[in-house]
Amino acid sequence: MRLTLFKPNQIRQILVVTLVLLFTSGCRTTIIYNYADWLIAWKVDDFVELTDPQEESFKAELASLFKWHRTQELPKYVVILDDLTIAISQNNTDDLLSLVDKIVASGERIKA
């Protein structure tokens, strides 16, 4: 019998919470983000005891998730933030609402 401690969406939810905290922490964001995979694994270790195979599987899944996020999602965030800056400076409500939809979609991609 294989014990599954986390469903894939739970790992993604942990990442979402972690990223929200990181993005709101200011200049420490880069440092924390670069070590977030380690921090997440460390915190998980505080709550559950994984067997060696479970730990390896968890770390591999987490590494894969972070690779995807760095290569696919972060470039999209840059575009959204640039567009957000322009929309705010121009007081463009329609663009702001569209950007909110894009931000929500980003969260949904992480949950998926």
Image (cartoon, rainbow, N blue to C red):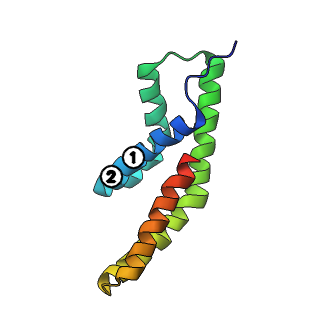
Locate residue 63, reporting x and y percent.
60, 41
At numbered mark 2, what does the secondary structure look like: helix, strand or loop?
helix
User: Residue 108, which numbered label?
Assistant: none
Quarter of the image that includes the N terminus: top right
Q: Name the residue type under label 1.
A: Ile
The three-letter amino acid code for the residue at tag 2 is Arg
Q: Residues within 10 Å of mark 2 (few under 14, many from 20)?
A: few
Residue drawn at the location 62% of the way across and 21% of the way down = 54
Identify the disc placed on residue 28: 2
Q: In which quarter of the image is residue 56?
A: top right
Left or right position of 54 against 11: right
Q: Which of 56 and 106 is in front in this view?
A: 106
62 is higher (above) or lower (below) than 110: above
Identity of the residue furthest to the bottom in this view: 90
Residue, x 49% and y 67% (percent of image)? 102
Q: Across the whole image, how many numbered discs are drawn on residues?
A: 2
How far apart are the alpha carbons under marks 1 and 2? 6 Å
Could you tell me residue 77's position as x and y percent?
48, 65
Q: Mark 1 points at which residue?
A: 32
Where, by quadrant of the figure, is residue 94 drawn? bottom left
Q: Nearer the viewer, residue 103 or 28?
A: 103
Q: Which residue is drawn at 51% across and 59% down?
A: 106
Cβ atoms under marks 1 and 2 closer than 8 Å:
yes
Left/right of residue 90 with respect to residue 43 in the rendered view: left
Quarter of the rendering containing residue 6:
top right
Residue 44 sits above or below residue 98 on the image: above
SS under mark 1: helix
**Residue 8, x across and y down, in percent:** 59, 36
Percent from the top left, x then y, of residue 58? 60, 30
- Asked if residue 59 lies left or right of residue 102, the reply is right
List the single residue furthest toward the top: 1
